[in-house]
Amino acid sequence: MKDVEDAAGWPTTHGSLVFKENIASEDSTHVARLGAAGAVLVGKAATSEFGFVAYTSTKLHGVTRNPWNLERTPAGSSGGSAAAVAGGLVPAATAGDGGGSIRIPASYCGLVGMKGSFGRIPRGPRAAFGQLAAVKGTVARSVRDAARWYDITSGYDPRDAFSLPRQEGWEAGLGSRGVRRLRVAVAVDLGNAVVHPEVRQIVSEAADFLVEAGGLERVDVEVQVPESGITWASAGLPSLVADLQDYWPDCEQDLTGEIAFAMRAAPTYRAKHGARLEKFRVEMNEAMANLFEKTDIVLCATSPMEPFNAEGPMPNIV
């Protein structure tokens, strides 16, 4: 279980020294549904502090390393979950994703990362505040394991107003629909990202293979998603302040540099920033709707860079 997920009697620390003594009083809906299906909950997996960055190294848990290369990161924020699955400790683990936290660890560790639609797996009780993009999901060793996970955990929960109705047949439906002649657009950089040349080459070669092997129809579609910049980076500030307002600034020395910086910047957050975020959300939704009128699948890089040093920080040059 990623250490942002509540399980009764287990610590939920969010990867932070500030919450090292925090013991959950009840299961999250996600965990409760897994337990009811007979899943064995083995332990808690390290996360980047409050799930904010794409590597997993904290003052509480230390450095989480990639089982394929111990000098490299398994990414984040679900880095502990991905490392546990890739290392053979468990076949699947809980994960969450608001900005790549399922997808990048899965990519770096050679796993299946399943980030379903927003609300597919409920976030309650006490659904996450202030971040209307983060979803529950899994990192798993196979597509079948990930599909079974969604059979078990998805479906409406009244404690999460954004949760979606249950959809049956994730595992049973595997292989039931052919992909031949589906339209695919290959956009390694999604139109505006800076991608490392080796990553670009690998993704392009993989796309060529998949198009040929699957009998897909490659379409020439201009892919241009709105640039998010600092607007998206600020999306998690309200929930972070809600978590730490009773401890700040006394807790500053216990926080990682990125979280301390975010808390120092939080007083500058204004209504205009929230308005920009909502405007960006609308623009992104419209861009995706328009794109998928022209294609069925978009193939792109999961991360613009190769796995970097386990200790961090994230590179600022690709």
Image: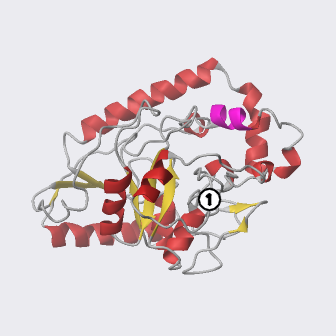
Look at mark 1 in the image and give the residue it sits on: 317
Secondary structure character of the magenta stretch overall: helix
- Point out residue 178 in the picture as x, y percentages from the top left corner: 11, 62
Q: Residue 215 is drawn in which quadrant?
A: bottom left
**Residue 143 visible in the picture:** yes
Q: Which residues are magenta?
A: 237-243
- Three-letter code, disc 1: Ile
Q: Residues within 10 Å of mark 1 (few under 14, many from 20)?
A: few
> Left or right: 269 with respect to 120?
right
- Taking the spot 83% from the left edge, 37% from the top edge, the residue there is 247
**Residue 238 among those drawn in magenta:** yes
Q: Is residue 277 above or below residue 188?
A: above
Name the quarter where the N terminus is drawn. bottom right
- Point out residue 315 in the picture as x, y percentages from the top left corner: 65, 60
> Left or right: 138 with respect to 66?
left
> Left or right: 250 with respect to 256?
right
- Taking the spot 65% from the left edge, 78% from the top edge, the residue there is 71
Q: Residue 181 is drawn in which quadrant?
A: bottom left
**Residue 100 visible in the picture:** no
Name the quarter where the C terminus is drawn. bottom right
